[in-house]
Image (cartoon, grey):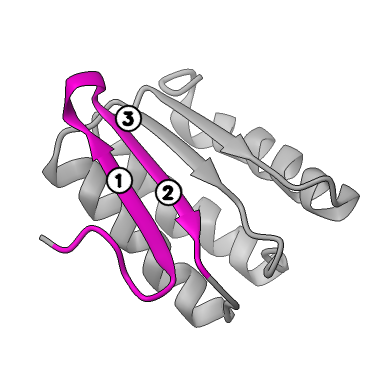
Amino acid sequence: MQLTTDLLACEIATDSSLLRSRWLGELTSRTYRKNLLHACVLLKVHNLSYWLYRTSKHYTPDVSDQTWMQDVLFPLLRQTNLQRCAVVVSEDIFQQLVADTLCSRSNRVFKGKIK
């Protein structure tokens, strides 16, 4: 299975059950969602427990992307073995606010499954 796409670099460390991902360029809402689904598939197929996710300075999820994550991505992630997810954000205050909002929303879906 392909690890890296045109826009998302993914690395798997099987010994530590870790997926590392980072964005490689400019994103649209469509490519953002498509590539996050790709990462979700990698987590599931490789039965990974940890995800280190570096956000992009090139794209901040808008409200529709945030809703999509809550309604589509988070339930899919709940079906994986994911136990912890670390999100590295830029110093952009808006990105930090979005990350905080998504973490709060994810708690409703994961109900303590992911820290």
Asked whether 81 or 106 is in front, the reply is 81
Instruction: Give the structural element (helix, strand or loop) at label 2.
Output: strand
**Which residue, given by chain and number where applicable, does mark 1 sit on?**
11
Q: Is residue 7 magenta?
A: yes
Residue type indicated by callout 1: Glu
Residue at horizontal 46 percent and vertical 35 percent from the top: 52
Q: Considering only vertical position in the picture, is 37 above or below 13? A: below
Asked whether 36 or 70 is in front, the reply is 36
Instruction: Give the structural element (helix, strand or loop) at label 3.
Output: loop
- Label 1 vs label 3, nearer the camera: 1
Instruction: Give the structural element (helix, strand or loop) at label 1.
Output: strand
Q: Considering only vertical position in the picture, is 66 above or below 109? A: below
Residue type indicated by callout 3: Leu
Q: Quick one: label 1, few (<14), some, or many (20+) residues within 10 Å?
A: some
Q: CA distance from mark 2 to mark 1?
A: 6 Å
**Which residue, given by chain and number where applicable, does mark 2 sit on?**
21
Query: Is 88 left, or right, of 79 in this rendering?
Result: right
Q: Quick one: label 2, few (<14), some, or many (20+) residues within 10 Å?
A: many
Q: Earlier in the sequence, mark 2 or mark 3?
A: 2
Where in the figure is residue 16, as x and y percent of width and height?
A: 25, 20
Query: Is 83 left, or right, of 96 in this rendering?
Result: left
**Which residue, given by chain and number where applicable, does mark 3 sit on?**
82
Residue at horizontal 56 percent and vertical 37 percent from the top: 106
Q: Earlier in the sequence, mark 1 or mark 3?
A: 1
Magenta stretch bounds: 2-24
Asked if the residue under mark 1 is in contact with the one under mark 2, i.e. CB atoms within 8 Å, the reply is yes
Asked whether 9 or 59 is in front, the reply is 9
- Label 2 vs label 3, nearer the camera: 2
Q: CA distance from mark 1 to mark 3?
A: 16 Å
